[in-house]
Image (tube, grey):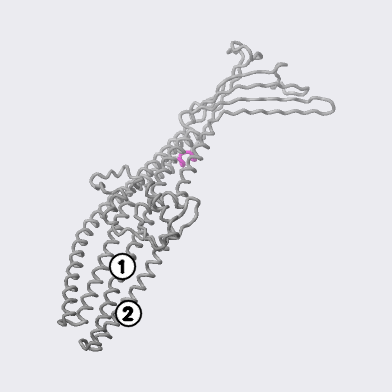
Amino acid sequence: MKASITVFLFFFTTCILSQNVTSVMTLSEYLGYVKNYHPIVKQANLIINESEAKLLKSRGAFDPKIEVDFDKKQFKDKNYYTELNSTFKIPTYYGLELKANFENNSGQFLSNDLNTPNDGLYSAGISASLLNGLLINKRMASLKQAKLFLNQAKEDQQILVNEILYNAATTYFNWLKTYNEKKVYESFLINADTRFKATKRAFFEGQKPAIDTTEAKITLNTRKLNFEKARIKLIKSSLELSNFLWLNNNTPVELQENIIPDTNTINNVDVTFNIALFNDENFDINNHPKIRSLNFKINGLNIDRKLKLNNLLPKLDVEYNFLTENRNQINSFNNQDYKARINFKVPIFLRKERGDLKLANIKLQDQKLENEIAKITIKNKVNAIQQELNSFRYQNNLTSSIVKDYHTLLNAEDRKFFLGESSLFLVNYREVKLIEAKLKAIDLENSFFKTKANLFKVAVINLTD
């Protein structure tokens, strides 16, 4: 794919110097360029960047913290109080928190419970939530959900990129269709011009009546009109294609006239879309990005449900700190000098907590149902597309046979006309039928390509790099 992009860049940089040189842009080169440089694809990558930022933010809840609280009151040369309280905290994954503290308080009007030795008081301890918040709490749930959301974002990003590539591919197929239509009208315009000149010459030689030159002229002007319409359609489709072409610095690129689509696309479309080996019988729906994304969402809702279930437990917070005056001797900490705290509370009816749990269960059940619906929908879409592709192959064989037979009829009628055994009306009739058959074949091929692209989109297949 990188080599294809290099070739495609070469097309654009040399088109100004070689306007008369025709360059073919294949579907693979085009999609590779879109995937690497289109702004919306870059915007899709921001989804992952945002989720990574949210994951970093949730991890911040476990960052160690230093807190310093200083409070002093001085009035009329009296030191009412001076309070210094500094703490170093280390939150852990579960509902535990390690803590080291230093207090140094003084003053004439200091509260008795705040008195400390002259050199201050050191403490080291632990706080824990023994019931509500021990095995799961808000910061634990936020971190787990952020990891799941990051994985979900990667799946959603792939779906969004495939959607953009699908739109780009259908635009390319439309460009190819209008190019083929223009070539058809161009070839038959040449035939009509040749036939008009021959008829006009035969009239002057007395071999054809004047009415034949009139009919030949009408046919020629009709071909010119059809060719002009096809030319305008090709210009419009080229401009639509240019909407997907950008340079690396977010600069849009206009498609040059000397760049044409690959008329051999039908032979490499499966390789380009990486569906050459795709088999719906071996298609594992559980590996589909949409289903994986929904599964990550379900797991996130499960975590939320566990958190709501945990909130039904009473809140029991305990804290124990060893105290010492000498920070240089670790063995100075003993269980005779300590500070402890117990905090217990529980709502009487738990109506808020029970309501939150019911809502969490409803959301979880709703998401599981959506997951099952998505599985069936994707399976049926893939199966329908495969059936449609099989039908297109059969239709294409019939259309090719019809075009070949109309070619045979026109060539035979054309020979008979120049031998004087047929009329210009019959030749034009055969030619109109051949044109219609060719246009139908082009339209059928376009539908076939779009169905291939739809399979690429529905199955969310990774584009070959």
Residue 103 occupies quadrant? top right
| Label 2 sits on residue | 221
In this rendering, is residue 463 above or below 407?
Answer: above
- Which quadrant is home to the C terminus? top left
Residue at the front extreme of this rendering:
205
In this rendering, is residue 382 above or below 208?
Answer: above
Tell me the magenta residue range: 351-356
Q: Position of residue 140 (x, y in %)?
A: 48, 33
Is 339 placed left or right of 257 in the picture?
Answer: right
- Tell me the SS state at disc 1: helix
Q: Amino acid at mark 2?
A: Asn
In this rendering, is residue 360 above or below 320?
Answer: below
Q: Position of residue 80 (x, y in %)?
A: 78, 25
Disc marking residue 183: 1
Q: Camera-side residue: 286 or 18?
A: 18
Q: Residue at x 46, y 49 (%)?
A: 42
Is 242 placed left or right of 415 in the picture?
Answer: right
